[in-house]
Image (cartoon, rainbow, N blue to C red):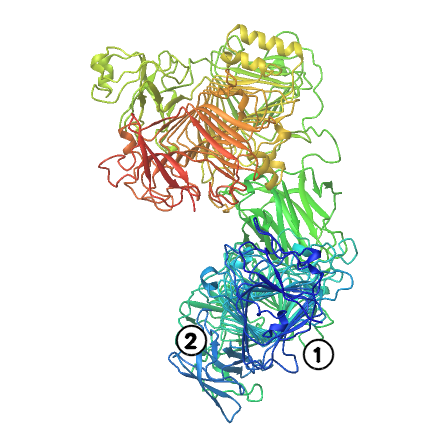
């Protein structure tokens, strides 16, 4: 039957007619070819087919095939219908679309054929060239055409494609490359023109070959053309090549004399031929556009349709793959299901591709064999989704795998073999060079992804398939990488089953690796991953390291984290993760030849690196077994700076982590001179070799240690630790009690011991780090000249313990001391965030250890948790001691009070956590604190050997379950005494049962019972504890000095001096005595008042009202210069007396330039003559007159800029001091067009007639010798504390969270009592903060009218003032939770409605030690008109993870009054503020409140002026208004860690910040809208001449240290400008919005963006004034040249690395400049 040639028009508009051979009635094909706007598709009118006739034809060239018409022309589209077979016997012109539903055969008799098309599509059809038995003999080229921009993309298939849907692609090229690749038989050097290869090849002249790199650089590849082939008699082949070689290529096989396993090191470079007689290629534009052809075979999965077949044999693919296009790969098995090995790629070459090599996607049991991939892009042999199993990769070669920057993120570090499911087969493959990447990468996920997404398959838990006899070399980083995780399990997806963590070995066998840049092989996080029969050499010295956190070094073999539940005492070595039957060679002489040198890096290189435990995982038994391991040449020599060691412990560990145990057995150490040529029988074609690397190093360098407790190495048979491997001990004298060779006779060392079935007994010799660890007893252990190593004899077992959750907070980041109770020998354990915010230590078992912390003063733990102890046997117990200078009532384990024992618990039978607590204090002979020794009690906790039970140890103040354990006992009772009683009167005491019946004598405890009205009319001797339940007053007729250990006022008792209406006229000095070992006054489970305390509890009242002064502080009225003995103060009538102490605060960046002096004379309203005499002359600094008038204490008023000659008298006060000033104190008010900016330092008055202080105060405050244990004043619960014009000095108890003045969980007083007190105070005008009465009423103030007013709190050793809501977090919380509560707003603490507020007003407050100075946690508190300075950050002896940022004023809640306070010097933060709800702020556009609760506060001389965090009001906006910041170092206003809400700033003034004035960092969701609104901002770059002299860089700053005392003297490690020259200063920086922000100092930068930017953030700045920003012209003529001041800076992500760009200059001379800044 004749077949008519049918012409269909309109398939694509503008195309030539389409030639179609079709048996269907319609021309239109059911397979949709393309859809594009304006393009049609061909179809026939059914009527037009009535006269169609058919004929059978088969040759493409015959006209009869095409209905008598000419064969298809250029750009025709052709369909071969089902049931039709056409033989391609000619090369047709370039077609557009070729659809094959039938069969297209390639004519085997045609010598040359070229098939070209844009699309070749098989729909159930077949494209066949040759067969497996009769390969195609001619030359067939298939070229795929397509333009990247213009190509029409078919669904699924794309463009420029050879695609098969349910079809068969079977292309069998002739075996023109046998073998497809081989090895060099001998090393060749640069300029060589011939090579000898293994085997007799059939390669021909004209063939292109590639020789793989033998160096660390994958690009050291030679590509050339064969000009002649000579088959040699020894079975090898000599190839002459056209081009001289550019690189050295190795051709050597080596074994090592003395290697008991005779491992073969094969370092023969691979040589592959790229030519095949069937070529599939992209068109000539491919290399320009990176848009090549691709082959895709897929299955429709329709019923009755067989799976497709894709068979490529001896085919060359080049210019294939489409860059950055998913699914467009050179060869792509796409969702074909189980191919049952019917589809394969064999003996092919895939080279110069733009997107991978061979991809298997959603397909199983494909075979890829003996195929060469060269110069591919991205992962080359690629399993896509993670569901693919049973695929067989054998004998394949990948050379030069290159980076793809636009595919998976992992393609930035590509692997030649990318394996996403372990159950595949890889045998005999070679990965010969990946740029920036890896040879083999097992990347296993929880579940398959992509189109194969399912939860029934769990790749990273599946059992291992086969990995055997593969080779990896010349890869940038790792030869074999298992990353991120792999845990082969019995039940891969069975989380709910009992086998959830039942691991099985995953065996990788027979890898040969060399010249891999970082590691030959590495498993990142793995279960029982085992490496068998491995040979690795010359790895670790590559050019680059992958970015890693923690220490890293090069190595041959490495397991980083081992995740294991089984203890090593129950785990035979052969069932552990580890390395078995392996060889490691440090540095071969061959590897130093020709272009293979120099070795690029200078890092440490190890033979094997042992694992660490995974932080936080309960599977913490991180073991590694190293068995039958030969180490060659890892001795103490180097080449190009590389240092070698055999064993590196604790892979990738962060500092001070580790402690895991690894076991070794049958280790052999050989010198590099042991290298010999492998026997010819091992591998044929071996060239002769004469060893010329004759180093005869007798002993290896076994280990190098980095920190204490890094790891434990157990030598199970004496092959690691012996006289042949270890150098002499330090001092050169060995211990006569034992020798190193004793390690050979340890339990289990015998060769017949079955390590496959029997766990190794404890007791082998061990190796440890000797750094900072002196726990090792000399009779048992010796330190050797082996990298700070300690070797311990047989029979001494060591165990790891971790500890965290330790308190008080002061201990959080300090070093812990582990002390052997028997020997007093110690080890240091350093705190690390990566030890779960704690410590790790290793100790010998069966002993007692006392844990304490390295801190100058005595501070005992109030809590700690031991966890993740090694589980060993019952004999491996530990006794862990904690000691207490103040005896606790009992010890709790895991919050359960323990029954008291009479003796130490039985370590073999008692439960872990059993406690023996000896309540009898004994002298601590081990240790002294600042020279002081203490008596203390000891709690001993059993840590049983066969368990890892977590144990939290906490001393209890109350025992026996009692709710109340008041050491003061029951109330004293009613003892009626009429009239007024006097202390001096013997009759007062006679007959009183409660008071003891006699007048108190020195040291006695005193009780004042209810109903007594007692006047203290004399100074008693120093007393013990004084308990007041009556009414006690100090005589107004004489001065009184009252000394006691503690004074407690309770049960409606009172202690008063004066009252709210009449101040006390005489001196009262309250001296409190006591030390850190003084007995505590425990009121209840929730209140330990401590010692050395004046306390009002349970309804007591303390009211002390000193002689008033007009103000406690004011501002300088004129600059006070160094050398002057005069201060000129703003205001008159201050009430400051001669002999009183004053402190003038700093005007520089260094708060320590504050100076304290005594007043000699006071002169109000001094005359011009007096001022001149005092040095305030007409040519001197400006005098600011009556600036205190407008705003009490600190404000703005008239300004005189003239000299004294123009003004006769000043509204000021002139002080004469007892000593000259050491520093300049600049007083300046800058005038910016009528806007006055006040930069005057303050002067504080610190004296009063009523003083509360430590009796031994000066000594207590000494850093060397003192206990840092001062007095404390406490009001707790429904009690009342009113201190007015009182001095509290040498106060606070460091580390205990016991401040100088503490309003702790105040409760409402009875209504009548509260009203009476408040009314009396208000009537006399003595109520503090009276100007804030409206705000106070609004906030509910008055329920408890406690206050601190007009007083001086100085020389604070802990917090100075604290209004608190919760039980002391400094003492009772873990380190982690305490940080969270202390330095993040706590909703629980801040919203407690049952806690009453207090008032802190008009005070001067000096100092705090590593805690906040003033801390406010209670809503309704009023904090106004306070001056505070001297917030100290303790950085000594603390870890780098210390993130405590103490603030002068710390406010954790909203709805408080915070006005007119000055933070005048902090080593970290001025104000740390929970921002106000934005609705309360007076933004001119957004509106808001008018009566600001938080306003007119100032911060200067801090690291950061104002630190803003989110409020707890529920509003999604936080802000601040009315703050002035000047001369703060890093930032004026900042949001550390990124604030979580929008921000509004109004009326903020920032002057002369060293780095950035205002920077807001926001952290939130990607698409969450957020606004930063700023209004009425004033930013000043330079304010006056002193701006160019204060910390101007004249004195060099190095690592934050400088001799210039005007600079900040205790910078954070993350501060800017830690080095000179300084960087430019910026006023306003662009806000940054990101998913994650760094947490800040000390460990991380202030402002590093750690996540992607968010997309809906905006910053609006309205009404800002910039002044004094002079750009590069700042401080002209300065030396060194000033770095410049710039108004506006763009964060580095927004304007990175650009030069400053001046935008405008305003009328005030401010250079408005965009300046890049920040941390790239």
* CA–CA distance in space, label 2 to label 1: 41 Å
- Which circle marks residue 1053 in the picture? none
> Left or right: where does residue 866 sit relative to residue 242?
right
Return the x and y of residue 925 as percentages of the image width and height. 57, 48
Looking at the rendered structure, the secondary structure element under dot 1 is loop
Q: Nearer the viewer, residue 739 or 658?
A: 658
Residue 942 percent coordinates (x, y) = 70, 51
Residue 1141 location, x and y as percent? 39, 22
Closer to viewer: mark 2 or mark 1:
2
In the rendered picture of this protein, how many numbered marks are placed on residues? 2
Find residue 981 and report its image quarter. top right
Outermost residue on the top side: it is: 1323
Classify 1478 as above or below 49: above
The residue lying toward the viewer, choosing from 660 and 618, is 618
Q: Residue furthest front?
A: 51
The picture quadrant where one finds residue 1667 is: top left
Frontmost residue, 504 versus 213? 213
Q: Is residue 728 visible?
A: no
- Residue 752: assigned label: 1
CA neighbours of label 2 inside 10 A, class few (<14), some (14 to 19), many (20+):
some
Q: Position of residue 873 (x, y in %)?
A: 72, 61
Confirm whether residue 1585 shows in the render: yes
Q: Is residue 1676 above or below residue 649?
A: above
Q: Nearer the viewer, residue 1341 or 1173?
A: 1341
User: Which residue matches tag 2?
Assistant: 592
Q: Earlier in the sequence, mark 2 or mark 1?
A: 2
- As displayed, is residue 1681 above or below residue 216? above
């Amino acid at each position: 039957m004749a077949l008519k040639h049918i012409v269909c028009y309109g398939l694509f508009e503008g195309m030539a007619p389409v030639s179609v051979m079709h048996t269907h009635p319609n021309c239109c094909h059911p397979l949709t070819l393309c859809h594009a706007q304006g393009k049609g598709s061909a179809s026939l009118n059914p009527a037009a087919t009535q006269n169609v006739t058919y004929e059978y034809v088969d040759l493409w060239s015959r006209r009869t095939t095409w209905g008598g018409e000419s064969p298809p022309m250029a750009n025709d589209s052709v369909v071969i219908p089902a049931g039709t077979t056409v033989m391609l016997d000619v090369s047709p012109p370039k077609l557009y679309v070729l659809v094959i539903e039938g069969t297209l055969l390639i004519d085997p008799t045609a010598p040359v054929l070229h098939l070209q098309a844009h699309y070749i599509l098989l729909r159930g059809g077949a494209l066949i060239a040759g067969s497996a038995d009769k390969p195609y003999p001619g030359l067939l080229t298939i070229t795929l055409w397509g333009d990247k921009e213009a190509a029409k993309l078919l669904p699924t298939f794309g463009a420029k494609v050879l695609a098969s849907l349910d079809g068969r692609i079977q292309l069998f090229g002739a075996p023109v490359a046998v073998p497809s690749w081989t090895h060099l038989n001998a090393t060749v050097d640069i300029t060589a023109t011939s090579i000898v290869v293994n085997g007799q090849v059939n390669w021909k002249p004209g063939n292109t070959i590639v020789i793989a790199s033998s160096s660390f650089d994958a690009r050291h590849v030679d590509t050339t053309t064969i000009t002649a082939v000579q088959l040699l008699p020894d079975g090898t082949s000599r190839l002459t090549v056209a081009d001289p070689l550019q690189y050295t290529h190795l051709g050597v096989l080596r074994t090592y004399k003395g290697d008991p396993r005779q491992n073969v090191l094969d370092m023969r470079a691979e040589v592959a031929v790229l030519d095949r007689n069937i070529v599939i290629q992209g068109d000539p534009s491919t290399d320009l556009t990176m848009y090549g052809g691709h082959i895709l075979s897929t299955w429709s999965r329709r019923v009755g349709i067989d799976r497709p077949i894709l068979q490529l044999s001896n085919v060359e693919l080049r210019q294939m793959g489409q860059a950055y296009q998913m699914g467009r790969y050179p060869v792509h098995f796409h969702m074909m299901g189980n191919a049952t090995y019917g589809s394969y790629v064999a003996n092919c070459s895939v080279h110069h591709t733009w997107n991978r090599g061979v991809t298997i996607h959603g397909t199983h049991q494909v075979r890829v064999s003996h195929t060469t991939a060269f110069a591919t892009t991205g992962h080359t042999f690629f399993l896509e989704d993670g569901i693919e199993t049973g695929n067989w990769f054998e004998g394949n070669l990948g050379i030069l795998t290159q980076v793809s920057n636009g595919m998976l993120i992992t393609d930035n570090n590509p692997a030649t073999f990318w394996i996403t499911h372990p159950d595949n087969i890889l045998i005999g493959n070679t990965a010969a060079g990946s740029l920036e990447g890896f040879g083999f990468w097992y990347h296993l996920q929880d579940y398959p992804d992509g189109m194969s997404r399912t939860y029934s398959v769990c790749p990273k838990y599946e059992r291992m398939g086969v990995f055997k006899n593969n080779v990896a070399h010349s890869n940038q980083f790792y030869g074999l990488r298992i990353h991120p995780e792999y845990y082969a399990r019995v039940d891969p997806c069975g989380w709910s089953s009992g086998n959830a963590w039942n691991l099985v070995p995953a065996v990788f066998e027979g890898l040969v690796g060399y010249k891999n840049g970082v590691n030959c092989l590495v498993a990142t996080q793995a279960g029982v991953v085992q490496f068998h029969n491995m040979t690795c050499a010359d790895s670790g010295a590559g050019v680059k390291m992958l970015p890693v956190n923690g220490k890293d070094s090069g190595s041959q073999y490495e397991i980083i984290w081992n995740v294991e539940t089984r203890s090593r005492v129950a785990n035979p070595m052969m069932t552990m993760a580890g390395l078995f039957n392996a060889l490691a060679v440090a540095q071969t002489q061959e590897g130093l030849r020709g272009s293979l040198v120099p070795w690029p890096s200078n890092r440490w290189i190890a033979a094997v690196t042992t694992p660490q435990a995974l932080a936080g995982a309960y599977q913490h038994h991180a073991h590694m077994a190293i068995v039958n391991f030969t180490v060659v040449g890892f001795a103490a020599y180097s080449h190009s700076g590389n240092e070698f060691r055999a064993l590196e412990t604790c892979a990738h560990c962060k500092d001070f982590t580790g402690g895991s145990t690894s076991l070794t057995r049958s280790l052999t150490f050989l010198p590099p001179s042991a290298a010999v040529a492998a026997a010819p029988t091992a591998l044929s074609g071996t060239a002769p070799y004469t060893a010329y690397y004759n180093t005869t190093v007798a002993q290896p360098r076994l280990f190098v240690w980095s920190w204490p407790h890094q790891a434990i190495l157990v030598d199970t048979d004496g092959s690691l630790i012996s006289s042949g491997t270890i150098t002499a001990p330090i001092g050169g004298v060995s211990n006569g009690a034992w020798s190193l060779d004793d390690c050979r006779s340890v339990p289990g060392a015998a060769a017949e011991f079955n390590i496959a079935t029997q766990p190794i007994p404890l007791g082998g010799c061990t190796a440890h780090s000797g750094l900072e660890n002196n726990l090792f007893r000399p009779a048992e252990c010796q330190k050797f000249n082996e990298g700070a190593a300690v070797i311990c004899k047989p029979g001494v077992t060591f165990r790891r313990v971790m500890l965290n959750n330790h308190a008080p907070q002061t201990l959080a980041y300090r070093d812990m001391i582990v002390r052997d109770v028997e020997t007093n020998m110690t080890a240091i354990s350093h705190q690390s965030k990566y030890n779960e915010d704690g410590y790790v230590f290793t100790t010998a078992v069966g002993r007692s250890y006392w844990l304490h912390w390295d801190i100058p003063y005595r501070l005992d733990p109030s809590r700690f948790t031991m966890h993740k102890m090694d589980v060993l046997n019952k004999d491996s117990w530990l006794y862990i001691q904690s000691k207490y200078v103040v005896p606790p009532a009992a010890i709790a384990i895991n919050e359960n009070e323990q029954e008291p024992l009479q003796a130490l618990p039985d370590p073999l039978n008692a439960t872990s956590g059993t406690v023996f607590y000896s309540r009898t204090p004994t002298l601590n002979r081990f240790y002294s604190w600042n020279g002081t020794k203490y008596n203390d009690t000891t709690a001993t906790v059993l840590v049983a050997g066969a368990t890892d039970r977590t144990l939290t140890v906490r001393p209890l103040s109350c025992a026996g379950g009692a709710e109340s354990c008041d050491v003061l006992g029951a109330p004293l009772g009613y003892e009626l005494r009429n009239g007024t009683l006097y202390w001096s009167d013997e009759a007062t005491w006679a007959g009183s049962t409660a008071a003891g019946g006699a007048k108190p004598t020195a040291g006695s405890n005193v009780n004042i019972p209810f109903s007594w009205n007692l006047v203290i009319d004399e100074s008693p001797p120093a007393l013990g504890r004084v308990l007041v339940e009556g009414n006690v007053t100090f005589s107004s007729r004489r001065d009184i000095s009252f000394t006691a250990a503690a004074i407690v006022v309770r049960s409606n008792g009172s202690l008063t001096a004066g009252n709210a209406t009449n101040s006390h006229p005489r001196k009262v000095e309250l001296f409190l005595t006591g030390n850190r070992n003084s007995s505590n006054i425990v009121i209840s489970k929730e209140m330990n008042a401590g010692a050395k305390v004046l306390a009002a509890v349970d309804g007591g009242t303390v009211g002390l009202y000193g002689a008033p002064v007009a103000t406690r502080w004011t501002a300088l009225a004129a600059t006070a210069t160094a050398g002057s003995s005069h201060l000129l103060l703003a205001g008159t009538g201050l009430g400051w007396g001669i002999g009183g102490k004053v402190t003038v605060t700093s005007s520089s960046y260094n708060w320590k330039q504050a100076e304290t002096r005594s007043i000699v004379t006071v002169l109000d309203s001094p005359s011009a003559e007096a001022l001149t005499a005092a040095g305030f002359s007409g040519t001197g600094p400006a005098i600011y007159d009556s600036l205190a008038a407008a705003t009490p204490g600190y404000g703005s008023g008239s300004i005189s800029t003239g000299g004294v000659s123009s003004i006769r008298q000043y509204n000021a006060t002139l002080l004469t001091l007892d000593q000259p000033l050491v520093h300049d104190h600049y007083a300046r008010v800058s005038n910016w067009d009528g806007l006055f900016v006040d930069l005057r330092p303050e002067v504080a008055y610190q004296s009063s007639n009523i003083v509360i202080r430590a009796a031994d105060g000066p000594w207590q405050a000494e850093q060397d010798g003192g206990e840092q244990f001062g007095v404390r004043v406490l009001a707790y619960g429904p009690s009342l504390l009113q201190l007015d014009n009182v001095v509290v000095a040498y106060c606070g108890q460091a580390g205990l969270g016991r401040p100088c003045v503490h309003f702790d969980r105040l409760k409402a007083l009875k209504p009548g009592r509260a009203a009476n007190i408040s009314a009396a105070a208000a009537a006399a005008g003595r109520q503090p903060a009276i100007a804030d009465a409206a705000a106070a009423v609004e906030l509910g103030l008055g329920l408890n009218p406690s206050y601190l007013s007009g007083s001086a709190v100085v020389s604070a050793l802990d917090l100075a003032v604290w209004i608190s809501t919760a039980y002391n977090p400094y003492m009772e919380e873990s380190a982690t939770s305490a940080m969270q509560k202390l330095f993040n707003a706590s909703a629980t603490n801040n919203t407690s409605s049952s806690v009453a507020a207090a008032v802190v007003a008009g005070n001067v407050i000096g100092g705090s030690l590593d805690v906040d100075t003033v801390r406010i946690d209670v809503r309704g508190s009023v904090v106004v008109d306070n001056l505070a300075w001297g917030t100290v950050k303790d950085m000594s002896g603390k870890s780098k993870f210390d993130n405590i940022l103490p603030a002068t004023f710390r406010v954790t809640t909203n709805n408080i009054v915070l006005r007119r306070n000055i933070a005048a010097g902090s080593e970290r933060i001025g104000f740390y503020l929970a921002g106000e709800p934005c609705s309360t702020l007076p933004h001119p556009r957004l509106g808001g409140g008018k009566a600001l609760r938080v306003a007119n506060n100032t911060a200067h001389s801090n690291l950061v002026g104002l630190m803003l965090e989110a409020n707890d009001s529920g509003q999604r906006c936080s802000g601040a208004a009315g703050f002035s910041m000047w001369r703060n170092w890093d930032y004026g206003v900042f949001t550390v860690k990124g604030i979580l809400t929008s921000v509004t700033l109004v009326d903020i003034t920032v002057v002369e910040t060293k780095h950035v004035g205002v920077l807001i960092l926001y952290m939130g969701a990607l698409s969450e809208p957020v606004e930063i609104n700023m209004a009425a901002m004033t930013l000043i770059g330079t304010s006056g001449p002193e701006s160019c002299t204060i910390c101007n860089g004249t004195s060099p700053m190095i690592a934050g240290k400088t001799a210039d005392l005007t600079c900040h003297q205790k910078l954070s490690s993350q501060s800017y400008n830690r080095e000179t020259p300084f960087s430019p200063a910026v006023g306003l920086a662009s806000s940054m919005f990101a998913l994650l922000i760094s947490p800040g100092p000390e460990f991380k930068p202030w402002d590093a963006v750690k996540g992607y930017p968010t997309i809906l953030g905006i910053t609006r700045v309205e009404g800002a004034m910039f002044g004094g920003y002079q750009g590069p012209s700042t401080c002209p003529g300065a030396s060194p040249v000033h770095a410049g001041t710039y108004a506006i800076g763009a964060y580095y992500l927004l304007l990175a690395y650009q030069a400053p760009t001046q935008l405008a200059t305003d009328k005030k001379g401010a250079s408005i400049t965009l300046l890049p800044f920040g941390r790239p």
